[in-house]
Image: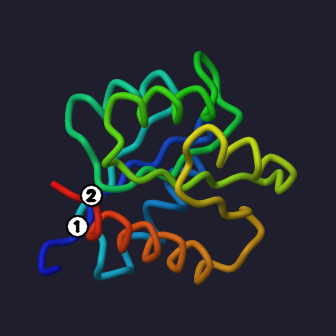
Amino acid sequence: MTEGLRVLVADDQPRARQSLKALLATWPLVKSVTEAASGKQALALAQECPPDVILMDIRMPEMDGLEATRQIKARQPQIKIVILSAYPDHMAEALAAGADAFVCRYEPPEELFKAIERVKQLRAQAPP
């Protein structure tokens, strides 16, 4: 794949969004990063300019990340969603909502990169 991934970071904490954006900017696989401050905003941005991958927080205002994941996957199943949460006990619920991967916030950055690589492979294998 020669073109980079378009990533949407959905988190209600500005510092978390900026940190993830800075981290992703160091990785050559990523072409662009867009930000959403709520699940509702993530849903709208996913429709306006569909990303390849969404890094989704669970606890957000207006619409939580689980509901946003359900709605995005129902409308645009080709978009891959990685739930990024401080609460590992939400993993089963996140995967049941349609998330393609789950990463605990306390994991090293390499684990996030591995999860994105895994869902990128799923995207490459998906039928057009």
Residue at 61% over, 37% down? 97
Residue furthest front in the image:
127
Residue under label 2: 6
Residue furthest top in the image:
62
Residue under label 1: 31
State which quarter of the image contains the C terminus: bottom left
Label 1 residue SS: strand
Residue count near mark 2 (Cα–Cα under 10 Å), binned few <14, some 14–19, many ≥20: some
State which quarter of the image contains the N terminus: bottom left
Q: Position of residue 24 (x, y in %)?
A: 42, 70
* Towards the viewer: 97 or 59: 97
Kind of residue at disc 2: Arg
* Towards the viewer: 20 or 46: 46
Q: Is residue 19 shown left or right of residue 47?
A: right
Label 2 residue SS: strand
Kind of residue at disc 1: Lys
Q: Position of residue 105 (x, y in %)?
A: 72, 62
Marks 1 and 2 close (CB-CB < 8 Å)? yes
Residue at 36% over, 42% down? 77
Residue at 62% over, 78% down? 111
Residue at 57% over, 72% down? 112
Q: Position of residue 94 (x, y in %)?
A: 68, 44
Question: Disc 1 to disc 2, how far (Cα)?
Answer: 6 Å
Q: Is residue 47 shown left or right of residue 73?
A: left
Mark nearer the N terminus (1 vs 2):
2
